[in-house]
Structures are given as structure tokens and as C-alpha cells.
Amino acid sequence: MNNLLKELALGLPQTQLVERIVDLTERLFPRKRVSILSLDESTNCLFTVAAPKLPIMYNQAINGLEIGERVGSCGAAAYLKRSVIVDDVTKHANWTPFLKLAASANVKACWSVPVISTQEQCLGTFALYDERCSTPLAIEIEILESMSAVYSVALEKYALEDKLTFQAQMDPLTHCLNRRALLERVEQSHCFDGNILGCFFVDIDKFKQVNDEYGHCFGDKVLVAVSEQLKHLLPEQAVLGRYGGDEFLAFCCFPDEEGAVAFYQTLSDELNKPVTLNDTNISVSVGFATKQCCSDLPMDKLIRQADSEMYKVKRRNKRAVPLRSASPSLIDINANPEKKVV
């Protein structure tokens, strides 16, 4: 147990931690089979995390099981937030609907403890299955609860790390990559698979005027709308980020230059339908530049080229593409601005 805690503190990946916990528990209980289930809070259903010694058909049957006061051992433990010990499944009412399944998996007993967070939320269950009817000793329950507690601490640690990573990499308003994370991502050449790398520089026209006349709250809605629109239109493998206040950068690979140009034209055409928000036309300008994926051209130079093209578009006013929501819900067109347009 001490080694497990040390590895957790040193950054043991979650998949390896689960393997370690299962292995350690099954060595402590050599005749029993471990099952770790996670609870989906949105559906109140349990899903298999690890149960290597249980039959596949059994794991598939209980995957997605809705919890309840009388739902087996794990379903009840998650619902009640307390241990549910069934020493003989054939004699326990909770197992009546599952007797055929239990028999096919040679399950005679199941001891389940909930995995509880520091906020008293159930995160899942930690269970032992036995091929024989069996009643646990007090020390066995204590060990099982200790393993569950370690797993709970680990889950909260991983969740916190994920949250901190998200906050460090994502723009909080648009949920696009922030500038630093975007540049780091695009510098990793393995992110892109293709011959031509396209860089799309998107800038909202007269955004300062939007903020001045409507207020920053409405300006934020415009930023979110642009980001959602880009997410909707860009290929799945594209890398999108908020580069500056009202600027977005997107990178995507194409098989050839013609494909990149064609996509740019398609993107422009898709955006080329005006929308009026509180008597003001909102539009964006898009600049475009490409390079060979294997080229030594520095990424910052590619970005400057796309930026330069974007300003040419602004000046020509030929590619000043009006903003259009990818769906009506992206912008509340009837929203009350902080200041009416005069």
C-alpha cells in the first residue's frame, strides 16, 4: 500500500494505478475477483473501469446499470453510499433479478463498498466477487474500504490535475486553446498529418466599436459565437485557438495546395451570410497562408503571413465575411445590449 501511495504521489498514470490496485487487492484476496465501477452522475449508471477476472459477458451485462436501493451489491452500495455485503446471492432480494447472470459467471457472493469523495459524492464502487458463499472478516472489510479510499483520493487527484491542465491551456470564455497552448501545439509537428499546413487568421471587424457601443458582455457573446462557428466549420483534426482579444488562429493539414485553397473558399462561402445584431452588422476578416508540413519555415513567420493577408482582406473589404451563427442559439439576437446604438 505504501508503494502504491508513493507511486501516486510521483505521478502514476490513472490506467496504471487501476492495474496496481486490482493486482494488489487480488493478491490480498487470492480466491476473489475485483471489480471497479465508475458512477456517471448525469445518468446514475455504473460503468466498468476494471474487472479482469470476471467474464466479459458479465461485465457487458452490468455496464450501464442504473443504481438503486435494491440493485445487486454495487448498485445498492452506490445508491446508499455504504457497504453492501451479500454473502449468498441466491438468498438476497437484491440479486433476484440477476440470479441467472450470477450463475453464468459463477458468482456466489459479492462484497461492495462505495467510492466516496471528500465532498461526500459517490464516484463508483469497489467490489470483490467470490465463487463460494462467504462472509467477510472485519479485517477484510477494513482492507476493502482502505483500497476504496485510496482509489477515491486518486480519482480526485486526477480530476484536479485535469482541471488545472484545462485552465492552463484553454481560454475560459471561448474554450479554445489559449495563445501559449496553441503555439506549443502547432510547434509539435506530429500534430499534423498531411503535405500542406494551412494557417487561417480570423479577426472580428470593428470589434472595439462593438464593445464601446454594446458593452463587453455583448462583445463576449460575439467572441463565443465566432469560436463556436469556427469549431463547427473546421475539420475535426484542426487546431483552433484564441490568439488575441478578437483574433483566432486555426491550423489544418491538406493533401495539396489546391485542397487548402478550396477549403479556404468553402470556409468563406459558409461564413458569407450576413446577420444583424441589435442594428449592427458583425463581420470577420480571414487571412490565409500555407507551408509544406516538412518545411523549415518558422511557425511565427507563417502566422505573420496569414496576419498580413488578413489585413489585406480588411483593406480590400472583399473578404470581410459577415458573422453567421452555426446555430440560432449561438447568439441571442434579441439580447439587450448595455448601450443602444445611436
Image (cartoon, rainbow, N blue to C red):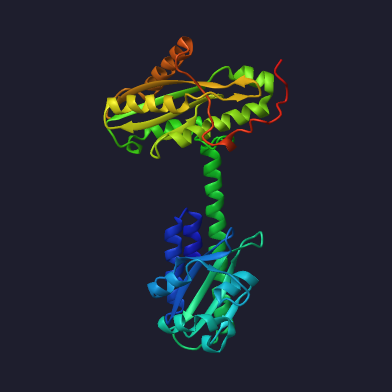
Q: Is residue 253 visible?
A: yes
Q: Position of residue 21 (x, y in %)?
A: 46, 67
Q: Position of residue 188 (x, y in %)?
A: 36, 35
Q: Position of residue 82 (x, y in %)?
A: 63, 73
Q: Residue at x 52, y 53 (%)?
A: 158
Q: Does residue 285 appear left or right of residue 213 in this picture?
A: left
Q: Nearer the viewer, residue 212 or 86?
A: 212
Q: Nearer the viewer, residue 170 or 44?
A: 44
Quarter of the image where the C terminus is located: top right
Q: Does residue 151 appear left or right of residue 186 in this picture?
A: right
Q: Does residue 24 appear left or right of residue 142 in this picture?
A: left
Location of residue 194 with respect to 43 vertically, above or below: above
Q: Position of residue 192 (x, y in %)?
A: 33, 36
Q: Does residue 137 appear left or right of residue 264 in this picture?
A: right
Residue 237, quarter of picture: top left
Location of residue 164 with respect to 74 vertically, above or below: above
Q: Nearer the viewer, residue 40 or 214?
A: 214
